[in-house]
Image (cartoon, rainbow, N blue to C red):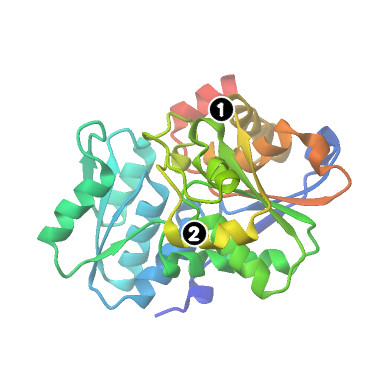
């Protein structure tokens, strides 16, 4: 049985001169697209599956955490059930199934993911109910990215934000290594609950699942445990239009030879919203994952 650090792949740092020249910034990409299952979520999922005693784990996910948890459970010989919206990317649904997990598809207009998880939890009393973000084991798994970032001299780190699992983990890793880097969140404008929460000083929720192309950030609100870290460790959250998210996906493909899913392109989208904000600084943009349906990706690249 491998430890977390033995199981994960280190993040891939990319310095694209073409991209730097285009932006006029000293930008480094920290890509988790080459992580197991194609996103940072494997760090969290493996840490959780490794450290809970339960033989079966239940979760809800739009895709990335679901497939990461499915693979982690496969490696650790545990049962996994993932509740997914019917609108999830097909590539993510099939990936979850391919690792041996059970997929429970729901129409979120009829029953919410959390409500369906509650129903299944009643039927599976011995299962551990895992949040993709609001769980200390998830945050601790993601904090290993912060450890890697702290080993470099970045002045600004920009991270995508949905439920807050990634950015709170990065914050924890940076802080314990005494990093002086400023941590900035990048969030879809169509689902800007985190930005509104930071301004209000308390958790503010979206009224419904945001219709953004960044499917990994279609969350109703930040997690409670994530918020406690975010409100102290994140300096600001930049709201990114879907147009800038799509543009960032195209730029990564054209100038860095990198496939990023829309959620993974949020950090670059934040830069495109206000490049002057980052001039003269050593900036790191987190690309959280690269799992996107081929047809959706084709449409985005076609503009």
Observer-nearest of 215 and 223? 223
Q: Position of residue 215 (x, y in %)?
A: 44, 37
Q: Which residue is mark 1?
A: 242
Which quadrant holds residue 79?
bottom left
Q: Quick one: SS at disc 2?
A: helix
* Other-residue count near label 1 (Cα within 10 Å), few / some / many at <14 / 14–19 / ≥20: some
Task: Judge whether 59 appears above or below 146 on screen.
Answer: above
Q: Quick one: SS at disc 1?
A: helix
Residue 11 visible in image = no
Residue 262 visible in image = yes
Q: Position of residue 48 (x, y in %)?
A: 39, 69
Q: Position of residue 100 (x, y in %)?
A: 26, 57
Query: In the figure, is residue 121 to the left or right of 294?
Result: left
Counting residues from the start of the chain, the first of labels 1 and 2 encountered is 2
Task: Judge whether 72 appears above or below 189 on screen.
Answer: below
Q: Which residue is mark 2?
A: 226
Residue 267 is marked as none
């Amino acid at each position: 049985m491998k430890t977390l650090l033995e199981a994960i792949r280190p993040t891939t740092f990319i310095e694209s001169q073409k991209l730097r020249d285009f932006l006029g910034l000293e930008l480094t990409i920290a890509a988790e697209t080459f992580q197991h299952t194609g996103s940072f979520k494997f760090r969290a999922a493996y840490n959780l599956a490794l450290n809970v005693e339960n033989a079966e784990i239940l979760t809800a996910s739009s895709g990335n955490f679901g497939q990461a948890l499915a693979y982690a459970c496969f490696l650790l010989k545990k049962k996994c059930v993932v509740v997914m919206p019917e609108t999830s990317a097909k590539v993510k649904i099939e990936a979850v199934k391919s690792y041996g997990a059970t997929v429970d598809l729901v129409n979120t207009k009829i029953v919410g993911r959390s409500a369906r998880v509650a129903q299944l939890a009643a039927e599976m009393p011995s299962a551990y109910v895992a949040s993709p973000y609001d769980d200390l084991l998830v945050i601790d798994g993601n904090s290993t990215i912060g450890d890697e970032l702290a080993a470099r001299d970045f002045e600004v780190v920009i991270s995508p934000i949905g439920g807050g699992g990634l950015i709170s983990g990065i914050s924890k890793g940076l802080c314990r290594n005494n990093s002086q880097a400023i941590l900035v969140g990048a969030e879809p404008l169509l689902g800007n609950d985190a930005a509104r929460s930071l301004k209000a000083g308390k958790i503010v929720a979206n009224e419904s699942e945001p219709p953004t192309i960044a499917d990994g950030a279609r969350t109703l609100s930040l997690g409670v445990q994530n918020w406690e870290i975010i409100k102290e460790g994140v300096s600001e959250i930049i709201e990114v239009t879907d147009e800038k998210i799509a543009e960032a996906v195209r730029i990564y493909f054209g100038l860095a030879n990198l496939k990023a899913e829309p959620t993974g392109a949020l950090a670059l989208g934040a830069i495109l919203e206000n490049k002057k904000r980052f001039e003269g600084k050593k900036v790191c943009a987190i690309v959280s994952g690269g799992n996107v349906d081929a047809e959706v990706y084709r449409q985005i690249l076609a503009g």
